Amino acid sequence: MTTAAQQALRRTMEIFSSTTRFCLACNVSTKIIEAIQSRAAILRYSRLSNEDILQCLLGVCEKEEITYTNDGLEAILFTAEGDMRHALNNLQ
């Protein structure tokens, strides 16, 4: 999000803070403005192992009847760098 968009989000968070809870996800927390970070409980997660990502990708391929090659899955694992969302987007 741009800084301007984050400022707009901050304002929305302030207005609705008594009735609404916000859940935000990001890959690089340093790109989030301080005004939002100060209003948040920050939870940090470690990257997933390639084995965990591969298991999920194989499950998706089976359920969606997607054909794949081992080289293709290896490329997805390499580019995902432990990020399941990235891996699923690349599979798509």
Image (spheres, helix red, strand yellow):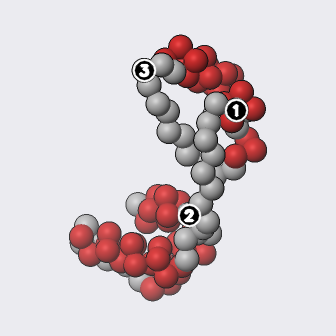
| Residue at x 62% of width, y 22% of height | 10
Q: Which residue is mark 3?
A: 19
Q: Which residue is mark 1?
A: 38
- Label 3: element kind: loop
Which callout, 1 or 3, points at the residue further toward the start of the chain?
Answer: 3
Gap between marks 1 and 3 measured at Cα: 18 Å
Disc 2 residue type? Asp
Mark in front: 3 vs 2: 3
| Residue at x 49% of width, y 82% of height | 51
- Decide if residue 82 is on the left or right side of residue 38: left
Which callout, 3 or 2, points at the residue further toward the start of the chain?
Answer: 3
- Label 1: element kind: loop
Q: Which residue is mark 2?
A: 83
- Decide if residue 10 is on the left or right side of residue 64: right
Residue 90 seen in the current view = no
| Residue at x 70% of width, y 32% of height | 38
